Amino acid sequence: MKALTWQGKRTIGYDDVPDPVIQEPTDAIVRITSTAICGSDLHLYEVMGAYMHAGDILGHEPMGIVEEVGAGVQNLKVGDRVVIPFNISCGHCWMCERGLQSQCETTQVTGKGKGASLFGFSELYGQVPGGQAELLRVPFADYGPVVVGKELPDHRYLFLSDILPTAWQGVEYAQVPDGGTLAVFGLGPVGQLAARIGRHRGYRVIGVDPVPERRAMAERNGVEVLDFGKDVAGQLREMTTRGPDAVLDAVGMEAHGSPGAGFLQQATSLLPDKIAQAALETASVDPTAVLHTAVQTVRRGGTISLSGVYAGKATPMPLVDMFDKQITLREGQCNVRRWTDTLLPLVEDTADPFGLDDLVTHTAPLSQGPELYKRFQKKEDGCIKVVLNP
């Protein structure tokens, strides 16, 4: 089969790789019909290469048609149309039973001290072959895959794999009071959906992003928008009297505005793998312009919800200000299966309450994936969300 493979920093291949096979009775093989490029894929493309190996199959936002099931699979059949959550969870361990599927004790990568295994990620999260491919082996197929209808196009369902439940959890964690104000920093795909979810719940939502095309997309979906300028905290306080009730950071370690941290982040990515791993695990830092601005912006007694990923072990936190302002901080990898039953009826709603018909900016064959990684990373050509069709 064909697949997108990691070959080095900023180098993606479109290669022939072996077809996956059933390895456990609880496996299924899914023929992929649509697969997206996620902002988290750019972490592997750019910064986290020390944990990647040439030939690793990328991708963790897939959906498709079940082609084969193991002898132990009872809840799926050949021909089912399914969305595959990005975290691999068993459904029956202590963590899964408590809605913490991203911490699944059956698939935890204990050797690296990490949570549940992920599709298409580095050795930090199990090095499981991903879904930017023609076929995907899905472990724990009785629990993970979400069976969906056959009438609506793929893009109405695809984002149940990651970014829609990630955005939903981010808004849940933001603890916005009824009628309150939510500021969303970063209007990439997760930020776009978080802003729309906030609107759906009746909040006032203000989106902040330096990219005009992203602000325009948010604005046409009913979100107030601001450029990320020097005094965005002051502007938000002025617009809201005390500051927003909550700030959702959908940017994470891709933030700009901290030249020293950015330099160290890039320098680490150029080191030999073992040295880079040691640096990432002990002394690495992320640019924190957004995180610090969130602390400045949120009202006293408010909440900051982190959906953006930070990876630097030594990333500084403004704890003095957070303590003084009595800020609540909530964060964490999305527990996808915790939210999919709630989200599926909303995805299928003919009113399209999350504007899923206005999110995908680029659709292309899988073969164009390497070029679209470049375009997405550089934010060129209005590239906000890429969907590839194997």
Image (spheres, rainbow, N blue to C red):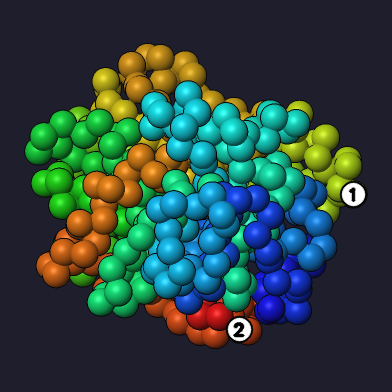
**Of marks 1 and 2, which one's residue comes earlier in the chain?**
1
Name the amino acid type tagged 2: Gln
Tag of residue 165: none
**Residue displayed at 54% across by 61% down:** 69
Residue under pointer 1: 272
What's the amino acid at mark 1? Pro
Q: CA distance from mark 1 to mark 2?
A: 29 Å
Q: Which mark is residue 368?
A: 2
Look at the numbered disc 1 and give the secondary structure of its residue.
loop
**For the residue carrying disc 1, how many other residues have a C-alpha within 10 Å: few (<14), some (14-19), or many (20+)?**
few
1 horizontally vs 299: left or right: right
**Quadrant that contains the C terminus:** bottom right
Residue 224 location, x and y as percent?
21, 56
The quarter of the displayed image where residue 23 is located: bottom right
The one of 332 and 227 positioned closer to us in this rendering: 332
Q: Position of residue 360 (x, y in %)?
A: 38, 74
Query: Does residue 352 appear anywhere in the picture?
Result: yes
Task: Name the residue nearer the viewer: 80 or 275.
Answer: 80
Tag 2 secondary structure: helix
| Image vertical order of residue 5 relative to residue 246, above or below | below
Query: Can I make out residue 354 in this image?
Result: no
